[in-house]
Amino acid sequence: MPAISNSQSDAGGLWVSVAVAARRLGVAPATLRTWDRRYGLGPSQREGGSHRRYSVVDLARLDYMAALIRSGSSPAQAAATALAREFTPQECAPIATRPATVIEGGAAQGRIGGGNVVATPGGDRRTRGLAKSASAIDQTACASIISESLHDIGVISTWDELLMPVLKSIGDKWELRECGIEVEHVLSTAVQVELSAFAFKTATEANRGTVLLGAVAGDDHQLPLWAMGAALAEQGIRFVHLGGGLPLESLSDVISRTGPRGVFLWSQLEGSADADRLDGLPSLRPNPRIVIGGPGWRNTPPRGVHVADSLGAAVALMSEIIAD
Ligand code: B12
């Protein structure tokens, strides 16, 4: 079978980030950067050094390098062999349709994310069950696994240990064209429905402060907001979910009308929100405290705006703000 070049793989338009390539291989992003620096096994696409993207050929080569290391080669030997090798279109096909990488004479190789099941390395029974149910388009099973977890271990652990890993795996699989958008929709709808049901049921007992929740204009990713709402309600804090795609002008208006104690703003899509613009929010007395989160923020936020890097951290900050 003829080998495939990067320009051919580009025709498919499939270029993935370092984070996705690393998760796909089950190694840290730092390991991929080291393989690039030391052995020249880097991404084919580099835009001004910032947007580094791996092609399907790069991924096949990295997969091969990882398999050689697992079968006993040193990284330097594995890199030299992987760089010298050419890859057939079949070897560069989406994982679901390609045979496992097997090194002759080496140990049998497992493959991350094989078949149609979403990879959740190290996942427990529930994580595997949720990934499997989403892949099998069994939304009822997804909902009952999520609901059971919320009741057993609470919102923050359910988000960190169950929902986040499966959402990320499915996002990666979608980016790698190994599953369709329908799998993501089956899962995200079940997540949204279960988190919101839990949030509103728990909020009937909540009597501390009020926090406004919203995602920035142009961004429809709302699941972390539902996780925030449910986790705040668990702490007895009231919330109002203002949804995704929220223009700052609308947020300013709600702040003026309701005088909340805190505001949490989410931005998911890379570069979708400018933290500088938060300076324009109305000053009221008492001033609502602003917390921002998500990978989409650019620029340094104005003084007084807090940045949270996890659900637990955001809820802890809001709890302190309400207690002030
Ligand atoms: C579900 C989902 C959707 C759903 C959202 C449904 C809903 N009701 O919210 C729908 C289908 C609408 C959707 C649409 C799109 N999506 Co989408 N989506 C996702 C998915 C699978 C999960 C999103 C999520 O909830 N992430 C939250 C957590 C799980 O992830 P995280 O932010 O990376 O977590 C980090 C931190 O933020 C922090 N953290 C985690 N949780 C929390 C919580 C709080 C409170 C805090 C403070 C911090 C924190 O910890 C992590 C650090 O390790 C992601 C995959 C992914 N990796 O996130 C793609 C993803 C975000 N989507 C993506 C894309 C490209 C899109 C679309 C542009 C696709 C398209 N072509 O139409 C549209 C954009 C629509 C829009 N205008 O916003 C890309 C974004 C790439 C980028 N460079 O920004 C992703 C990463 C998929 C991928 N691998 O390519 N999406």
Image (cartoon, helix red, strand yellow):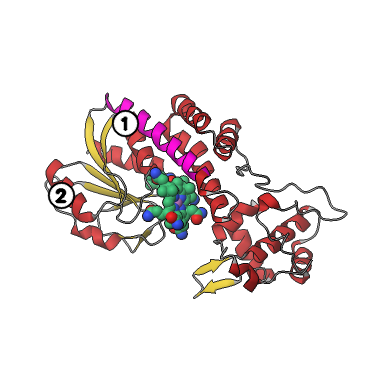
- Upstream in the sequence, badge 1 or badge 2? 1
Q: Which mark is residue 279?
A: none
Q: Residue at x 39, y 57 (%)?
A: 296
294 left or right, relative to 178: left
C-alpha distance separating marks 1 and 2: 24 Å
Where in the figure is residue 318, as x and y percent of width and height?
Answer: 29, 40
Where in the figure is residue 34, as x and y percent of width and height?
Answer: 63, 65
Residue 94 drawn above or below residue 145:
below
The residue carrying pointer 1 sits among few (fewer than 14), some (14 to 19) or many (20 or more) residues within 10 Å by Cα, namely many
Magenta residues (range): 183-204
Is 15 within the magenta? no
Residue 43 drawn above or below residue 228:
below
Q: Which mark is residue 253?
A: 2
The amino acid pointed to by label 2 is Asp
Quadrant containing the C terminus in the rendered view: top left
79 left or right, relative to 296: right
The amino acid pointed to by label 1 is Ala
Quadrant containing the N terminus in the rendered view: bottom right
Residue located beneath label 1 in the image: 233
